[in-house]
Image (cartoon, rainbow, N blue to C red):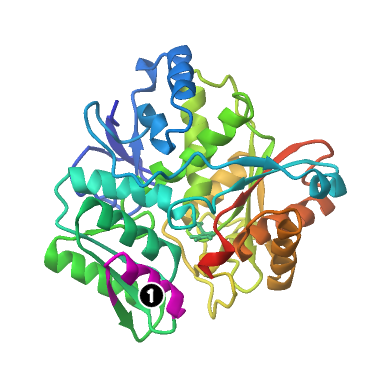
Amino acid sequence: MAHRELECGACGRTEPVTPGATVCPSCGKPLMARYDLDGLDAAALREAWASRRGGGMWRFRELLPLADGEEPVSLGEGDTPLLDIPRLGGDLDLDLRVKVESGNPTGSFKDRGLSAAVTRGSLDGAPGFVVPSAGNAAAALSAYGARAGLPVRVYVPADTPGGVKARCRHYDAQVVEVDGLITDCGREAAAYAEETGAFSVSTLHEPYRLEGKKTMMLEIVDALGWRAPDAIVYPTGGGTGLIGSWKVLDELVGAGVLEEAPTRMYAVQSEGCAPMVRAFEEGLEEAPTWEDAATEAWGLRVPSALGDFLILRAVRETDGGAVAVSDEAMRRGARDLGASGIDASIEGGATLAGARALRAAGELQEGETVVLFDTGSLLTY
Ligand SMILES: *Cc1c(COP(=O)(O)O)cnc(C)c1O
């Protein structure tokens, strides 16, 4: 089943499903795909999803933007492990699990979002794709665009590490270096999209990357025996995985697959770029731009996010929160995951650092099942 309509996450305006949809025409905020949950049979769904285990994230196609008969643009993304980490969990008296995303086709969870966005885009007649990014999103778009046989252009700040650009070029993308910040890249990418008709897949500027990202939570709930975890800790840049997790738990309850999903959501950011943490602590509904953002974790160097209000609502409505940790604590977290045999970039390390801070603050309780989102491979650095 494909989605029924698109709904603005801010003003609630609904739109018919339109090829090339971007943001809400009224208020410019993110659009979200809405499904006919009433029309789903929970038992049949669980059975169908279980029977397709090993088939990647598209095994959940009933809750993804794909109509019967349509084929996804896939490179085998998803079906990543949810590992327990008993030594690290024992230290904190938690049932600590880690969703390890490094096994995705380009080494990060960005693949899930870009598989969904490129799938919908290519089915909807996109002549090509464009994204502003200094990291994993650029590599993922390049790979999925190539898989779809469509041209990709990425705008990157000139000081982006050479490895990122090399990865994009490997997938035959056009790499445009911009003398400026990621916000400048955003402006140039938008102008290019306007000029050429290429679909821009900038974070939450189109509705489908969110749909791909939410499959992480579907896999987590499946791995836990159709039980939602007590809490998740998410390394937050633009927040798509956090918002997606919140959205899909609602959908699972709406479809009757879960009776309840009392998962508390925690956003972790770097002390050098913590707009969500500051807004959370100050009781704001939107997050003012963080000036002079500085962190080694490029996935978290996002000074302002279009979905800020959704991140803040997700953490508040689930009784979770937001916490900032130092780059040093993140690095230690990544090393400690490594010492348990787990591939983790600094963003993954941030989640262990965040869990430690939240446990010390009494936010996470003894014995709770807490899932860390280890979003990408150390090798992407
Ligand atoms: C993009 C990215 C993040 C941040 O993800 P958002 O969904 O934008 O919050 C975290 N970790 C890694 C490795 C990333 O590439």
Q: What residue lies at 45% left-to-right and 24% top-to-bottom?
A: 49
**198 relative to 20, above or below:** below
Q: Which residues are magenta?
A: 160-175
The residue nearer to you, when weighing 14 against 243, is: 243
Q: Position of residue 144 (x, y in %)?
A: 31, 54
Q: Position of residue 28 (x, y in %)?
A: 30, 55
Residue that carries the numbered disc 1 in the rendered image: 165
Amino acid at the residue labelled 1: Lys
Name which quarter of the figure residue 324 lies in: bottom right
- Mark 1 Cα within 10 Å, few/some/many (few <14, many 20+)? many
- Is residue 118 covered in magenta? no
Q: What residue lies at 25% left-to-right and 30% top-to-bottom?
A: 67
Q: What residue lies at 75% left-to-right and 53% top-to-bottom?
A: 340
- Is residue 163 covered in magenta? yes
Q: What residue lies at 34% left-to-right and 38% top-to-bottom?
A: 33
Q: Which secondary structure, mark 1?
A: helix
- Left or right of 282? Residue 103 is left
**206 relative to 189, above or below:** above
